Image: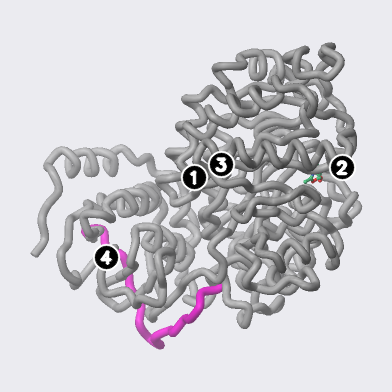
Amino acid sequence: MTIRLGRNLLTLTLLAAALVVPGTPAAAATAVPLTGVVPAPVSTTPAAGVTFTLSPTATVYADAAATDVAGQLAAILRRSTGYPLPIVLASGTPADGIALLLSGAPASVGAEGYQLDVSTSAVTVRANQPAGLFNGVQTLRQVLPPEIEAATVQPGPWTVAGGRIVDYPRFAYRGAMLDVARHFFGVAAVERYIDEITLYKVNRLHLHLSDDQGWRLVINSWPNLAVYGGSTEVGGGPGGYLTQDDYRQIVAYAAARYVTIVPEIDMPGHTNAALASYAELNCDGTAPKLYTGTRVGFSSLCVSKEITYTFIDQVLGEIAALTPGAYLHIGGDEASSTTAADYSTFMTRAQQIVAAHGKSVTAWHDIVNAPAQPSTIAQYWGTSTTNSAVAAAAQSGTKLVMSPASRAYLDMKYTRRTRLGQTWAGLIEVPDAYGWDPATFLSGVTEASVLGVEAPLWTETIETSADIDYMAFPRLPAIAELGWSPAASHDWTAFSGRLGAQGPRWRVMGVNYYASPQVTWQ
Ligand code: NGO
C-alpha cells in the first residue's frame, strides 16, 4: 500500500521540475560500474546483464522516517534529470522506482550502514537508521552517471548497473577539520564543505573556531571576542565571525546530513585573539596587539588568575548549550609559553569545566602530558610512528583520533610546486595520504584504542572555497576511505582507479581538485 504525501508537496515538486532551466547539452550519460565507489564498500556483488534506468515518471518511495533523506536525494536528481520524482510514503517493497526503507537491512550494517539492491525495475536502499539511508544515498549518487550532479537538466539516460552492495563503516569517527580562525570562512563555505565531505561518508566536522589570529564565534558574555578578536586574520584581511544563529544553522545543516559538529576553542595557547580582546585575561593585565602572522606557541591564557576559569566556563558553557554533539575540543596544542606544571593545572581544570557542562573533552594529543579524564579523546597529530606518551595513554584507556600530520594534514603541499600550503610535516601526495593504517600507525597502539581518523585543513595559506577544494580533493576521500573501508580492501591500485572515476563528478560539481599525476583520471 502506498500513501500520497500532501497535495501541496506534490504540487511544489512538479513546479520545481517545471522551473528547471535546461543547460548546455552534455554528452549522453554512461553506465558506471557498481565497483567504482569511494570509500570501498564492504561487499559488492554485480549482477551481470542487469541495468536499472530511471524513468521520467519514477517515484521515490520512502518510509515515514526517511522522507528527509528522500527529499535530499530527490532534490539532487530533479535538478539534473528534470523529472518530477514525487516522494511517496511506502510501507512495503515497491516494484519500481527508488525506495529508501528502514526495514529489511541486515543487522550487521549497524546504525550507519546500508544495503543497496539494483534490479531492472527498482533501486532499493535499506538501512536500520536514517543515517544508513543517507550513506546509501551517497553510494547511489556515485553509481549514477556523473552528470547526475549537474545543476541543470542533462539528457541522461540515468542508468545504474545491477547488483547488491552491503556496506558499513570500519571506524565510528570519520572526521574533517576546517580552521575558520586563520582565515575566516562563513556559513556558505562551511555548508559547501559539509556537502563535499558527506559525499565520502565523513560524519564529524571539527571547526577550529579560535586561534591567535582570530576569534570566530559570538560569545554573549564576552562580546569583544568576536567583534574585536574576530576583526582580522592571517595577512591582515577583514576576518569575520559566526553569530550564534549562524552556528546553529551550521549545526542543523550538519545534523540533517548526519554530521556532528565538534567545536574547538584552543587553549591555553593559540589565544592571542582572546588576550587582545580582554586585558584582564593577561597575567600582566595588558592586552597584546591583534596578530596576523603565522608563528605559533607565543600566547597563553593566564593560568594563575581565577578570571581565566570564569572566562572558559562562560565560553564553553555557551558553546555547550549550542552544540548537540557530546564533545567539545579544547585544543591544548603547542602551549610552549606555558610551563609543564601550569599546563597540567590548566588542562585539569578545563576538563572539569567541560564535564560540568555535560560534555566530554577532545584535545590535541599534547593533553597526554596532563592528567586526562577517562572520557577524554586525544587527537594524534605528530609526524612520527612512535610516541611513547601517547602509546602509554592509549594503553591506560585514552581513545585516539588519528590525524598524523605527515599523512592526514590537508594543508601540506602535494609537491614542491603546489601553490598553497605548508611543508613542515612533509609533502603529501595522494599515495602518502592513502598509504597508512589508522589502527597500526602508532607503535604500541592497537585498533581497540582508535576511534577513527580526521583530516585537518589549517588555513594559514587557504583563503577561498576553491583553495579548500584544491587541498581536500583528492586527499580527503583518501582519508575518508581509511576511516570507512575494511582494512582488507586497502589497495592503492584499486583505490586510484576508483578515485580517478571521481574526477568527472568533481568537474560537473565545480570542485577544484588537484589532478595528481599519480592517479589515472577519467
Ligand atoms: C599544527 C598547529 C597548528 C597549525 C598547523 C599547520 C596543530 C595541532 N597545531 O597542528 O596551529 O596551523 O600545525 O599545519
Quick check: 274 above or below 63?
Answer: above
Which quadrant contains ligand 1?
top right
Residue at the bottom extreme of this rendering? 48
User: Given this view, does label 2 or label 4 mark the residue nearer the observer?
Assistant: 2
Marked residue nearer the N-terminal end (2 or 1):
1
Looking at the image, residue 506 lies above or below residue 297: below
Residue ID for mark 1: 325
Residue 519 in view in this figure: yes
Mark 2 and mark 4 lie on one chain; the one further toward the N terminus is 4
Q: Nearer the viewer, mark 4 or mark 3?
A: 3
Mark 2 or mark 1, whichever is nearer to me: 2
Q: Which residues are magenta?
A: 40-57
Q: Which residue type carries mark 3? A: Ala
According to the picture, the residue beneath numbered tag 3 turns out to be 355
Label 2, label 4: how far apart the Cα atoms are = 54 Å
Residue 259 position in % (x across, y down): 49, 49
Q: Of helix, strand and loop, which one carries label 4?
A: strand
Q: Secondary structure at mark 2?
A: helix
Q: Secondary structure at mark 1?
A: loop
Q: What is the CA distance from the residue labelled 2 to the residue labelled 3?
A: 23 Å
The residue carrying mark 4 is 101
Q: Above or below — where is 439 with respect to 56?
A: below
Q: Amino acid at mark 4?
A: Leu
| Mark pair 3, 1: CA separation | 13 Å
Q: Is residue 98 magenta?
A: no
Q: Amino acid at mark 2?
A: Ala
Instruction: Specify whether residue 499 is in view.
Output: no
Q: Nearer the viewer, residue 265 or 230?
A: 265
